[in-house]
Image (cartoon, helix red, strand yellow):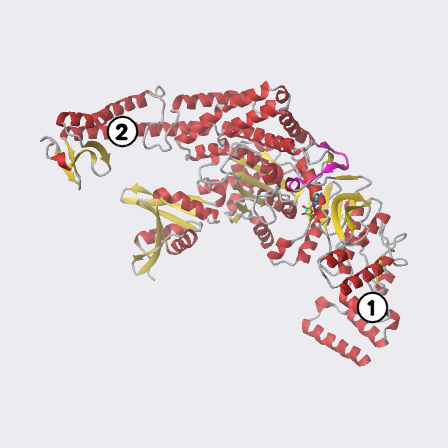
Amino acid sequence: MPAATGIVGEFLALKEETDADVLAMQVGDFYEFFGDDAELVADELDLKTSEKSSQGGSYPMAGVPVADLTPYLKGLVERGYRVAVADQHDGADGPERAITRVVTPGTLLETTDADARYLAAIVDDGDAYGLAFADVTTGQFVVTSTDDVDAALSECYRFDPAEIIPGPGVRDDDALDRLRDHTDARLTLHDDEAFAPGRATHVAREHFGRETFESVGATDAAVRAAGAVLAYVDATDAGVLASMTRVRTLADDDRVTLDATTQRNLELTETMQGGSEGSLLATVDHTVTSAGRRLLAAWLQRPRRDVDALRDRQAAVDALATAALARDGLREHLADAYDLERLASKATSGSADPRDLARARDTLALVPVVHDRIVDDPTLADSPLATVLDADTRERAADLHDELDAALVDDPPQTTTQGGIFARGYDDAIDDARDRHEAAQEYFDTLEATVKQETGLTHVTVDRNKTDGWYVQVGKSEADRMPERFREVKTLKNSRRFVTDELEERERDLVQLEDRRSDLERDRFETLREEVAEHAALLQDVGRAFARVDAFASFAEHAVANDWTRPELTHEDVLDVDAGRHPVVEQTTEFVPNDLHLDDDRRFAVVTGPNMSGKSTYMRQTALVVLLAQVGSFVPADGATVGVVDGVFTRVGALDELAQGRSTFMVEMTELANILHTATEESLVILDEVGRGTATYDGISIAWAATEYLHNEVRAKTLFATHYHELTTLADHLERVVNVHVAADERDGDVTFLRTVREGPTDRSYGVHVADLAGVPSPVVDRSREVLDRLREDEAIEARGSDGGTGGGTQQVVFDLESGSLRASDDGAGSASADGGATTADATGGDDVVEARDDDVAGERTAGEGDDALSEREREVLAELADVDVAATAPVELLSRVQAWQERLDDGE
Ligand code: ADP
């Protein structure tokens, strides 16, 4: 096909210039898409395409009116596309077009929801991973760094960015896949240059000021990430750079690790099914502003370790919980507040309209009101709330308010095209233009009456429209009686339209005056908007202060309504919860509260109990109590002492992973591996069944070994729910392990779940009972009881204590496959395999800790009579089997060897 020329050629040439997915090019009153772009837009947004022919070719074409571009842009960008916009302007030889901006998921200003919308950069500078997160809709800018790629990615998941720009060192398939799996972000591979050490650092320092990063303690890697984000925002020309006035750091030692799995498991902002209803956020959110809600979400996603900072938050919540009246008053005022953080971005990007500025004025008027409410209440005045709005901020807010108040009319129009924005007395030139415009208008306002009086006619109206301008319209029956000087300009079905020379002259004047007035007002408005943009930092400060008060009040509101208490935060090694509840479940259920006590001597609780008795709930509520305490909230308990943790790790049923096509057991083990590697003595670990996804002996061995490792090596505070009753004997052998169980009562064949957590292991498995209730045939149920009883007979289990190496003093536990139960072997590992069962793992031995046999193979062997009964031939085959180096042998070769062994065994029968 010959190269396209004309409009299509121009479009394709511009498309070459950009790496955006789609180009919208202005042609007169429309933005047009051609070729593949037209088809993409048509598919995504239900737009109709037509064909545009161009020099020997025909191209699909789709277009939207200029005024309607925004919703289409938003639609495309929210679907993850990057859209370049080419605007048209008048050039020397007719219209010229150039790309003016690229709208991307992370730089989209026009959002409908109140949620934060982060653009993230990750760089690897050799020493550390630097991360920067910018919310262009509010100007929030956060940097952090960590030396571990997993921690860096987790941090990224937690911000849940709309767009991520990974630096050159973070673009391997593994990192990109993980980002894709755990976020909904668009991944954009931006120019390497933006990440280059010298340039990125320079850009960041230029923007925020040389000293800033040092004073907030940002690392080199973090500064580079900041530079990359700024360079990218600049390249897209979103015009919001100036709204990024401040940078915050997340300190490494203030961070609480919450990996992606845990964030999901604990349903902090979304439930496992997706959707926010039923999440922790939705439950505790009583905020009355968008900014308050954003802040609350950010807090819940980022618990802290800084006890002083947390106590400050607690004190504010406590004060608001006590001062009910003042709290109500504050919330009422805040409900009228406009989103100032968003406004700051709109002002800097030039998209704020007169109504936005009027709302900013009205919100700034709330500053003294909110402050007075706080200081007039003795309880609030005596709390950290008293300094939420400091004197300097209040003063500057008052100045900006007065400026806006003097400038704007009470209720300005949304657009700048009509005038009517400014208050009288603000600007002489505008007042003058307005007076003259209004005077000129006067003639038209009174014209109808004048004509009626002059002519004595009754069916007379005066109006204007786009094509005819001003006219006098007279009903047909009377039109003949119009005086001479009225010239007819149009005949309609029931009426005729007239003008006069004077009317035309006055109209010319009026149009001129109108234009002058609106030009003046528009210019002045732009200046005013720039003045407001210069106060972006102030608007963000006030916005943030209001958001804090709103979020504190929300915690207080929830605490009061649900009888939550202020937890005691400590650096000591303790977790003590008195009558704790699950914050979400208690909303809909008559909840039975439960206690928990963990400390240095009691670090690991094995939680048993029948299915559905409440094990998961108990463990999750524990994690949520800790988390709520570490965001500064009150907690659902009669009392709690929380030793701050450095991370919460969970592994619970992995249903949703199944949907992603990964084997549950693989997922389970990956999660377990992550916990064993990452958790520390200061972490809280929640394990809801481990090893369930594989054969019993595999599973029990892994669970066993993991327990030993967590207890001896990691020493994390752990709650471990299991249906392997065998594990309850661990408490006899590992000093810091305790058993608790969720009690149930069985009477006359009915199981009543008491939901009460008690010390000690559960006394029996209710599984068989449930099978009975469910109608499993009685021979099966009876036989299960028999098997169960037999399994329980032996209880010889030894665990490796923390002093355990491979040497003296430890015993290993083995399954005796004949009796089908666990029992202690005489000593070390040697005899375990000789007994032909799964061995427990070497807890100190790292990755390959588990040596276990598949159930079936082992099962078959129990049919024989133990090793002594093996024939010579069988021994030989086994020896050969043991010698095979699977990795070094071709599959075909393996097959033929297996076949040969089988033949030899068959021969031997
Ligand atoms: P398990 O993990 O033992 O199978 P779950 O924790 O899933 O059991 O709880 C089963 C059901 O019991 C859930 O519907 C839960 O809402 C309810 N439940 C759990 N704990 C309590 C409690 N303490 N008070 C009231 N209801 C509870």
Instruction: Kindly check if marks 1 and 2 are in contact, taking CB atoms under 8 A apart as contact.
Output: no
Label 2 amino acid?
Glu
Figure disc tally:
2
Q: Residue at x 27, y 30 (%)?
A: 515
Q: Residue at x 36, y 22 (%)?
A: 423
Q: Given this view, does label 1 or label 2 mark the residue nearer the observer? A: 1
On the picture, is 531 further left or further right than 311? Answer: left
Residue extending farthest to the bottom is 907
Residue 289 locus on image (x, y percent) = 53, 33
On the picture, is 616 further left or further right than 788? Answer: left
Ligand 1 within 8 angstroms of badge 1 C-beta: no
On the picture, is 475 further left or further right than 244? Answer: left
Residue 591 locus on image (x, y percent) = 69, 41
Q: Which residues are magenta?
A: 567-586
Q: Residue at x 74, y 43 (%)?
A: 680
Residue 249 falls in image quadrant? top right
Near mark 2 (Cα within 10 A), the count class, few <14, some 14-19 or many ≥20, is many
Q: Residue at x 78, y 48 (%)?
A: 745
Ligand 1 within 8 angstroms of badge 2 C-beta: no
Nearer to me, 874 or 230: 874
- The residue at which mark 1 appears reads as 862
Nearer to me, 418 or 136: 418
Residue 511 falls in image quadrant? top left
Q: Earlier in the sequence, mark 1 or mark 2?
A: 2
What's the mark number on residue 514? 2
* Magenta run includes residue 828: no
Assign the N terminus to one quadrant of the image.
Answer: bottom left
* Magenta run includes residue 579: yes
Label 1, label 2: how far apart the Cα atoms are: 100 Å
Res 410 seen here: yes
Label 1 amino acid?
Thr
